[in-house]
Amino acid sequence: MDKFGVNGPMLLFQIVHFLLLMWLLRRILYQPVMNAYEGRKTKIAESLAEAERVAANAAEERSALEAQIAAERRQAQASLQAAVATSEEAAKNRLAQASSEADSMMAKARDDAEQTRQSALAGVQTDITELALAAAAKVVGVAVDEKRHRELIADFLKNEIGEVA
C-alpha cells in the first residue's frame, strides 16, 4: 500500500477514529434528534386525531342545531297559524255580534216607528172623530147620540184608513 502513498497504520487509525466518531454522534446527537422527531410526529398525529374528533363533534352539533332550528321554525309557523285562526275566529265572532246588534237595533227602530205610527194614527182618529162630531152637530144643529156617532166614525176610519195604512 506504500506504493499508492497510503500509510496503512494511519489509515487504520483514521478508520477507527471515524467509526468511534460515528458511534458518538449516533449516541449523542442522532438518537436524541430521532427521539424528538418521533415524539413530535406522535404529537402531530394525536393533534390531527383530536382535530378530526372535534370536527366530527362540531358536525354533529351543527346537525343537531339545524334540526332544532327547523323544529322551532315549524313550531313558530304552527303558532302563527293558530294565532291567525284565532284572530279570524274572533273577527267572525265580532262581526256576527255586530250584525246581531245591528239587527236588534233595526228591529227596535221598526217597533218604535210602528208605535209612533200607531199613536199618530190614534191621535188623528181622535181628532177626526171630534171634528166629525162637531161638523155633524153644526149641520144637524142638534147633538146626535155621541156614542153611536163615535162607533160609526171609528168603523169608517178602521175600514177606510186601515186599508190605506
Image (cartoon, grey):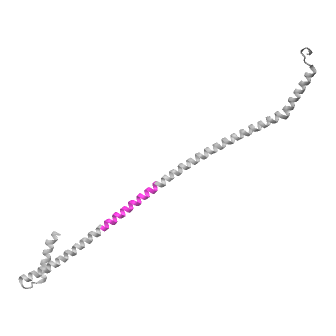
Residue at the (9%, 81%) spot, across then down:
136
Residue at the (15%, 72%) spot, across then down:
161
Residue 46 lies, in percent from the top left, at 72, 40
Q: What stretch is highlighted in magenta?
A: 81-105
Of all residues shown, which one is farthest toward the right? 9
Q: Which of 34 and 85 is in front in this view?
A: 34
Q: Is residue 164 left or right of residue 17?
A: left
Q: Nearer the viewer, residue 109 or 144?
A: 109
Q: In this view, does 141 lie to the left or right of 20?
A: left
Q: Is 68 rendered above or below residue 8?
A: below
Q: Which of 130 and 146 is in front in this view?
A: 130
- Quarter of the image where one finds residue 27: top right
Q: Nearer the viewer, residue 65 or 29?
A: 29
Residue 138 lies, in percent from the top left, at 8, 83
Residue at the (58%, 47%) spot, across then down:
64
In the rendered image, residue 88 lying in the magenta stretch gets the answer yes
Residue 5 lies, in percent from the top left, at 90, 16
* Predominant SS of the magenta segment: helix
Q: In this view, does 144 lie to the left or right of 33?
A: left
- Quarter of the image where one finds residue 24: top right
- Quarter of the image where one finds residue 96: bottom left
Residue 33 lies, in percent from the top left, at 80, 35
Q: How many marks?
A: 0
Residue at the (50%, 50%) spot, across then down:
74
Of all residues shown, which one is farthest toward the top? 3
Of all residues shown, which one is farthest toward the front? 5
Of all residues shown, which one is farthest toward the left? 140
| Image quarter of the C terminus | bottom left
In the rendered image, residue 102 lying in the magenta stretch gets the answer yes
| Image quarter of the N terminus | top right
